[in-house]
Amino acid sequence: MTATDPALMDAETLIALYARRALSPVEALKAVMERVARYNPAINAFAAMNPNALRQAGESEARWAAGRPIGPLDGVPATVKDVLNLAGFPTRRGSRTTDPRPQAEDAPVVLGLKSAGAVILGKTTTTEFGWKTPGDCPLHGITRNPWNNRRTTGGSSSGAGAAASAGFGALHVGTDAGGSIRIPAAFCGVVGFKPSYGRVPQWPHGAFSSVSCAGPMTRTVRDAALMLNAIGRADARDPLCLPDDAREWRAGIEDGVRGMRIALVRRWGFEPLLDADGEAALQRAAETLRAEGALVEEADPGLPDTRQVFGRVWGVALAKLVASVPEAQRGDLDSGLEEVARRESGLPATEFLVADAMRVEAAHRMAMFHLKYDLVLTAATPTAAFAADQPTIRPTEALWRDWAPWTFAQNLTRQPAITVTTGLDEHGMPRAVQVVAGQGRDDLCLRGARALERALEMPETDPLAA
């Protein structure tokens, strides 16, 4: 991406320019808004725009002029996925069945961004209630990939992935219950970081409370760490969040992987599909990390079949969600969501408890695995982004075959995982891999991803330049 267009600059660059008075937050926001006006009609990344964003950028500009920025992100354009509360805006979750009235208070992650000075540009689209990977929803329609508008962005953080890729701001909040940050990041050629469970506080908790995380979607690994500084602060509203250690997540991020033991993992209790381009991306990443001084070897953590575990967690959550919608409104729901809910609504409690026990077993085995291996390298998606307009058929099967077979295991084990783009395939679409660390070792996850990103030296590219 060009270093001269403020809309395509990363957050660290913007902050450095603001500090030198070489660029103002108003100039940066106007550059972003011009791109949104020009390209968003074809991409459809936004559920709502913030009419006060320009005024807020002006307030940031005044603070910088006075030498008193309120935080480390002051004036950086950011977006929030429309499953999280943004005060003064409704939270529609991609559904016609939700309340259109504005919310009274900010979600913890939004409060973190605002406290650091970020300018919220708007709310980004999501699949309905975040339930699936194809990037469409009944309320806002299809969100399209900036690299090719005929392809999907992936989901459920569809708008955040598109916005990050298209230059609609530097920082974007997604949520991830089975890959919903990492899949659209991989499909759209950006960085998607699912932190350790509880690292980023959430309130209110959604349907996938036991596995879901909020996290950064950015154009660089360093920006993801910078953003985590702001959003990874404990909030009393969330009883499940981790204690606030107030650390700087960029500390040590450039230390590399020399001497690390890295497991290349192909099985998550079953063998996920991976096409030839995905295999090439995985091999390129492994060779790159070896060249950086890491010991990379294939290994199997010996997990139970995570399809069986996640399928129950996902299905029961959706059944509960659909049951909470008034019967008169259920015809407005995504038909695939209803299909999964029907299949899982009669699941005996004993079967769900068995699945949850298997989830804990999987987390235990991964904890033991990380006594030997510092990091795991694995694929991110089975293919590149598929067609945006294709119908959702047999969603339960699609979940573990086409959508999230490489990503949902890390939600079950609650480990941090991050996607890094390795290049473009022969059709000009991004491919990516995942770097995974042990639970709580978000620092190692970011460090390994940064080493890979730095060594790959990806060319700066604007997907919308053509």
Image (cartoon, rainbow, N blue to C red):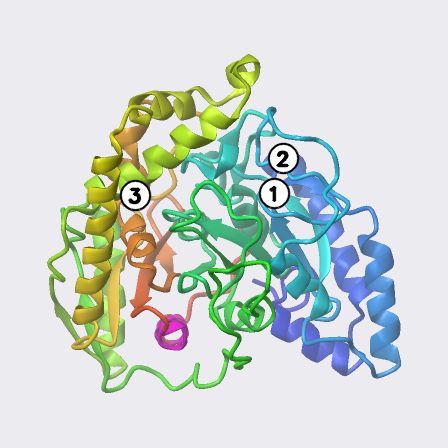
Q: Secondary structure at mark 1?
A: loop
- Which residue: 56% across, 68% down? 234
Residue 398's x, y, as percent? 29, 32
Q: Are marks 1 and 3 in contact (CB under 8 Å)?
A: no
The image shows residue 332, relative to residue 461, as above or below, that is above
Q: Secondary structure at mark 2?
A: loop
- Which residue: 54% across, 55% down? 202
- Decide which of tag 1 and tag 2 comes sooner along the chain: 1
Q: CA distance from mark 1 to mark 3?
A: 26 Å
Q: CA distance from mark 2 to mark 3?
A: 30 Å
What is the quadrant of the N terminus in the image?
A: bottom right
The residue tagged 2 is 92
Q: Which mark is residue 383?
A: 3
Q: CA distance from mark 1 to mark 2?
A: 6 Å
Judge left or right: residue 93 versus residue 179: right
Q: Nearer the viewer, mark 1 or mark 3?
A: 1
The residue tagged 1 is 82
**Dominant secondary structure, magenta:** helix
**Residue type at numbered disc 3:** Thr
Q: Are marks 1 and 2 in contact (CB under 8 Å)?
A: yes
Q: Are marks 2 and 3 in contact (CB under 8 Å)?
A: no
